[in-house]
Each structure stands twice: as structure tokens, then as C-alpha cells.
Image (spheres, rainbow, N blue to C red):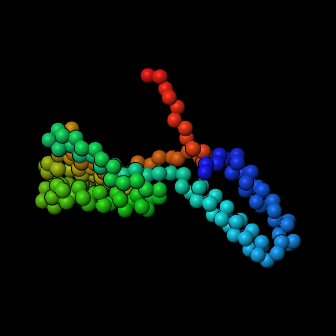
């Protein structure tokens, strides 16, 4: 069942407008009413919280061959970070990160003559071969998208090409 924002607000107002009747309700009905109010409040909090979605992408270009994939999708930042860290770990295993002697480009103390360079920040990990970025690089990132506020089922509209 899908409900739009206006219908949701009307439902909430109606449920909470019954507060004045609570003193006249029997114990079982009062208990059910309290459960319903709690459920509506909890659902409203969850709907407001989950207004973002996180997509973790994994891109690789190896010897001019492109591979683009989605490592995972999450509805909260913590889960997205876990998927992101796992995807970075997998990239490092796949390319034998320990043995290529990659340098962190944000660290000024490392030798600038190394060929492999990497950048690791909160939402992005990039590893590339110096001078061959367009031919050899790996990138994992978290992309954040806002979900529509309404709770209506989105309808597909035919469009002329």
C-alpha cells in the first residue's frame, strides 16, 4: 500500500486526535490505541531517517579494459562504510597492494618516484599508475542519493524519443 504525504498527515492527525477519548476506553482498547500511536510515531521517525540511500561503486580500468560494478547499496551510513571498506580490501587483495609499493599522495614524506599512487578519504579510495591514469586505475566510492519524500508509488510514464 502506498500513501502520499497529505494522506499520511491526515492519518497521523486523526490517530492523535483520539487522545481525548482515551479516558473512556476500556483497558484492552487503550492498550491497542497506545500500540497504534507508538507504531505510527516509530514509522514516521523511520521514514524521516531513511531519506537517503548510499551506493558503493567499484570502478577499474586495467590495460584500457573498463569494469564498472556496484559493490553494494545501503540505507544508512554505517552499513555503507562497511561495504566500502570491504570493497577497498578486495581491490587491495586483487592487485597485491602490499607488493606494488603504492604511495599515499597526501603524505609529503613518501618518495615521489614510485609509480603507483593512492588516495584514501572517508568516501573514496583511488589507486592509479602514474602517467597511465586513463589506462590503469581503481576507484571505490560511496555515492549518496536523496530519496523522494513522498510515499506514493512512482508510475512509469511513456515518453516519445
Q: Residue at x 43, y 56 (%)?
A: 74
Which quarter of the picture shows residue 39? bottom right
Q: Position of residue 72 (x, y in %)?
A: 36, 54
Residue at the image point whose x is 69% and y is 69% from the top? 35
Position of 101 relative to 144 (above/below): below
Residue 140: x and y, percent?
A: 31, 51
Q: Residue furthest toward the bottom?
A: 27
Res. 17 in view: yes
Please state if 89 lies on the left or on the right of 151 as rendered.
left
| Residue 77 horizontal/vertical position (percent) | 45, 58
Q: Is residue 46 above or below residue 117?
A: below
- Residue 49 position by quadrant: bottom right
In the rendered image, the vertical position of residue 44 relative to residue 7, given as above or below = below
Report the number of discs: 0
| 7 or 158: nearer the viewer | 158
Where residue 34 sits: x, y (%)?
Answer: 73, 70
Q: Which residue is the extreme one toward the top?
A: 161
Question: Along the line of sight, which residue is nearer the eye, 106 or 53?
Answer: 53
Amino acid at each position: 500500500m502506498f500513501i502520499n504525504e497529505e494522506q499520511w498527515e491526515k492519518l497521523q492527525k486523526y490517530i492523535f486526535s483520539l487522545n481525548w477519548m482515551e479516558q473512556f476506553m476500556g483497558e484492552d482498547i487503550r492498550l491497542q490505541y497506545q500500540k497504534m500511536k507508538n507504531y505510527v510515531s516509530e514509522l514516521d521517525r523511520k521514514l524521516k531517517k531513511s531519506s537517503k540511500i548510499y551506493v558503493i561503486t567499484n570502478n577499474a580500468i586495467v590495460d584500457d579494459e573498463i569494469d564498472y560494478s556496484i559493490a553494494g547499496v545501503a540505507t544508512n551510513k554505517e552499513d555503507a562504510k562497511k561495504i566500502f571498506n570491504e570493497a577497498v580490501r578486495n581491490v587491495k587483495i586483487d592487485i597485491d597492494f602490499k607488493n606494488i609499493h603504492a604511495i599515499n599522495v597526501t603524505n609529503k614524506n613518501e618518495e615521489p618516484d614510485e609509480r603507483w599512487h593512492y588516495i584514501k578519504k572517508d568516501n573514496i579510495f583511488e589507486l592509479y599508475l602514474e602517467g597511465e591514469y586513463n589506462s590503469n586505475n581503481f576507484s571505490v566510492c560511496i555515492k549518496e542519493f536523496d530519496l523522494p519524500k513522498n510515499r506514493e508509488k512512482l508510475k512509469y510514464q511513456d515518453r516519445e524519443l
